[in-house]
Each structure stands twice: as C-alpha cells, then as structure tokens.
Image: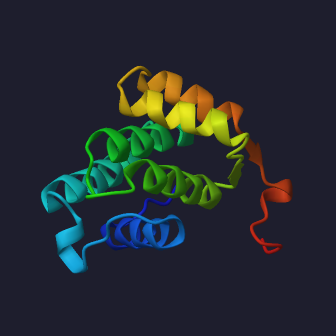
Amino acid sequence: MKYLTVEQLKTVNQRMIRATGGLYLAGEQNVVYPPSLESLVNFVQTRISLRPQPTVWEMAAFYMDRLIRDQVFHDGNKRTALEATRLFLEGAGYRLVLSPAHEVVEFATNVSRGLLSRDQIADWLRAHSRRRKNGRRNGKR
C-alpha cells in the first residue's frame, strides 16, 4: 500500500482549486497549519508499516476524514480529500466512482459535519469503488 506525500497532497489541492475555483495562496501559505498536514502523512506511513496492516478502506477513510475535518488548506478541503482518496485507492488497484454528484456532495458534507464515523466512511468508499480488472492500472501491470 502506498501513501500520499505532503507534496502530493499540496499538488492535489492546487489542481482542485485551479480546476474548480477558489482561494489558492502560493507556496506554504496555502496550508493553514503545516504540522497538521505532516502529521496526517506521518500517521498514514506509521499505520501502513504496522502488522496487521490496516485495510485499504480504513486508510482511505482516514485520508477522507482528516483532510476534510482538519481543514488543512485554506480552500478546497473536501475536493482535495475526494481526489486524494481517489488517487490513494487507484494506487491500491481500485477505481472510486464519484457519481452521482449530489450523492458525493452529500457524503463529503456529512463527513465535514462529523456525521459519519470512519467505519461509515470506509463503508461508503468500499460501496463506491470497483476493483480494476486484472489488477491493471492504465493498461499496465
């Protein structure tokens, strides 16, 4: 299982803001509290190295929950969390289906309001993901 780095998460946020609009502050200024983002990445690294290893769904739910609820960035936290979770699952051999749009928005909003536990987030992600055929990514093994 591969984790996303601090730099990758910053890039995802920048891409989401550029694609859909919002406030983006250059460089480190866009991260509200840099130690929070570093803590998130360090936690994932530590959890992945544990035995037994957590499930891909537990880790994806952690990304979703922490990125949204910790408000790591000045803007685009829900969009960044969805895209980061999608990328994480893709790296694990799954395709996250982010449709219908109204359901995805409701899900992300419920996470931000603290209405869903991590187990419920993991269940939603599992229900909205499909295993890539033959474990292939982009046509390659």
- Indicate left or right for 71 with 17 as reference: left
**Quadrant in the picture for the C terminus:** bottom right
Residue drawn at the location 70% of the way across and 37% of the way down: 128
Residue at 25%, 73% in the rendered image: 25
The percent position of residue 81, horizontal first and vertical second, equals 45, 50
Can residue 61 be seen in this snapshot?
yes
* Residue 53 visible here: no
Would you place residue 41 above or below residue 53 in this image? below
Residue at horizontal 31 percent and vertical 38 percent from the top: 69
Between 118 and 102, the one nearer to me in the picture: 102
Report x, y in % for residue 12. Answer: 45, 67
Left/right placement of residue 68 relative to residue 102 reads left
Q: Quadrant of residue 125?
A: top right
Nearest the eye: 19 or 115: 19
When asked about the image quadrant of residue 28, the answer is bottom left
* x and y percentages locating residue 65 in the rendered image: 39, 37
Left or right for 47, reference 78: left
